[in-house]
Amino acid sequence: PTILLTGGTYYVIPTMRPGITPGPYSFYVESVNTPSALTPITYNSTLSGVIGNVTEMDVFRFSATAGDLIIARLQSNVSGSYPRIGLYRSDGSRIISQYYSSTSVEISYRIVQSDDYYLVVDDYNADNTFSYDLYITTLNPPLSVTPIQYGQIVSGNCTRPLELIPSSLTVQPGDSLRFWLKSSCTDLRLYDQYGDGITISDPTILLTGGTYYVIPTMR
């Protein structure tokens, strides 16, 4: 973003390119840390919104503690759009931004400093309007965890777009685990106690004992 350290009046000037036929234009200006509209969001929440103009962006604010490993997920309803999600500090400077040429995108980041942060949603190419769902949570530890043990069949229902539904599992060093999932709407993820993702293999051998999180994740 453009960060203006001095307050006052500034001039935004559309300027004709040389050698180009005159035509219409539109532009959009918004502040990340003092936006015209701001929506609070908290961990383990899904909110819905609408990008009603191709140049629009929506801003969400949340509070985070140093060390939090966050994951934020965005899903649009327009196939072939480039939905983009960005994470910004309280001063408006950008930490990370990601987009994909599909209907969904996600970012993860370990918070360095306790503060308020902003999630910004827009269309990367400024070509599409769309409705969307936005989800954010922390992974160390996740919220609303259900303890499970070996040999237990865990069943449930996903009720919100993009949600993560964590279960905790205590393992011993060297345990060799196999995972099965039957679902039309979720994938299965595995995280350690620090929020770091672990690739699920067959089998998955965990060399370090402790608490791990098995998380069905809405596609």
Image (cartoon, helix red, strand yellow):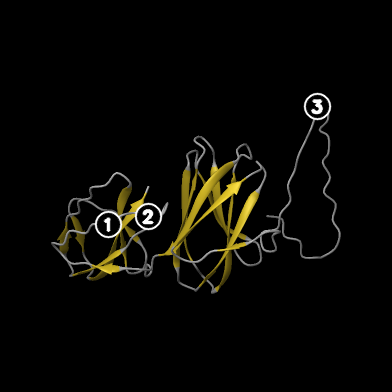
User: Mark 1 and mark 3: span between their CA atoms?
Assistant: 59 Å
Percent x, y of residue 25: 77, 36
Report crowding for label 3: few under 14, some 14 to 19, many 20 or more residues within 10 A (C-alpha): few
Percent x, y of residue 200: 25, 53
Residue visible at 52% across and 38% down in the picture:
78
Report crowding for label 2: few under 14, some 14 to 19, many 20 or more residues within 10 A (C-alpha): few
Dot 3 falls on a residue whose secondary structure is loop
Kindly identify the amino acid type of the residue bearing the numbered disc 3: Ile
Location of residue 76 with respect to 93 vertically, above or below: above
User: Mark 2 and mark 1: span between their CA atoms?
Assistant: 9 Å
- Residue sitting nearer the eye, 88 or 102: 102
Q: Residue 192 appears in which quarter of the rendering?
A: bottom left
Percent x, y of residue 126: 64, 40
Q: Residue 90 appears in which quarter of the rendering?
A: bottom right
Report crowding for label 1: few under 14, some 14 to 19, many 20 or more residues within 10 A (C-alpha): few
Position of 74 with respect to 5 (left or right) is left
Kindly identify the amino acid type of the residue bearing the numbered disc 1: Gly
Q: Which residue is mark 1?
A: 156
Work out which quarter of the rendered image holds the N terminus and state it: bottom right
Q: Please name which of the two marks, 2 or 3, marks the residue nearer to the observer.
A: 2
Numbered label attached to residue 20: 3
- Which residue is the extreme one toward the left? 151
Specify which label sits upstream in the sequence, 2 or 3.
Answer: 3
Dot 1 falls on a residue whose secondary structure is loop
Dot 2 falls on a residue whose secondary structure is loop
Q: Which residue is mark 2?
A: 159
Residue visible at 47% across and 39% down in the picture:
102
Q: Are marks 2 and 1 in contact (CB under 8 Å)?
A: no
User: Mark 2 and mark 3: span between their CA atoms?
Assistant: 52 Å
Location of residue 62 with respect to 178 vertically, above or below: below
Kindly identify the amino acid type of the residue bearing the numbered disc 2: Thr
